[in-house]
Amino acid sequence: MARKSLQSAAEEEEDVNITPLLDIVFIMLIFFIVTSTFIKEPGVDVIRPVAETQVEQKPAVLVAVDENDQIWINKEQVELSEVRYKVEELRRETPKGNAVVQADAGAKSEITLDVLQQVKDAGISDVALSTVAE
């Protein structure tokens, strides 16, 4: 009789409960998803102007102006009048994020300045112009 109770006690000790481990894994997964920032690509490659000084940015909103003065946000071509609305929409996803405007070296300065102003009007005060280091 005593032997049976020793065997059942040994079998119970061998059973591994992984429920707490799964709880920790799911909590870590949720933490990394919530704290990560996803960058929206503009959808067009631009030849950026050269600059002597440069500070690396991790933008939440990326806007591109190509050599044909077309504006791209999130792989979608938009009109100048739509830039503010699209940036406000992206800003809702990451309210504390900044913005970077990638303007092609062949793009008109007037269009680039108008895009910068539209981004600022959307409520993002930290706006940078993307360049290439010498």
Image (spheres, helix red, strand yellow):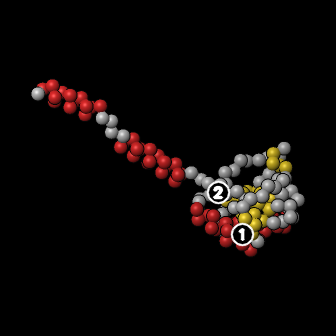
The three-letter amino acid code for the residue at tag 1 is Val
Q: Residue at x 84, y 44 (%)?
A: 134
- Dot 2: within a 10 Å radius of its alpha carbon, few (fewer than 14), some, or many (20 or more) residues? many
Q: Is residue 134 left or right of residue 56?
A: right
Q: Position of residue 7 (x, y in %)?
A: 20, 28
Whether residue 85 is visible to the viewer of this picture, yes or no, is yes
Quarter of the image for the N terminus: give it: top left
Q: Residue at x 24, y 29 (%)?
A: 10
Q: Residue at x 86, y 61 (%)?
A: 67
Instruction: From this view, report whether residue 8 is shown above or below residue 107.
Output: above
The quarter holding residue 62 reads bottom right
Q: Position of residue 18 (x, y in %)?
A: 36, 40
* Residue that badge 1 annotates: 83
Residue at disc 2, secondary structure: loop
Q: Position of residue 22 (x, y in %)?
A: 40, 44
* Numbered-mark total: 2
* Residue that badge 2 annotates: 60
| Residue ranking furthest to the left | 1
| Residue ranking furthest to the right | 106
**Reading the chain from its start, which is encountered first: label 2 or label 1?**
2
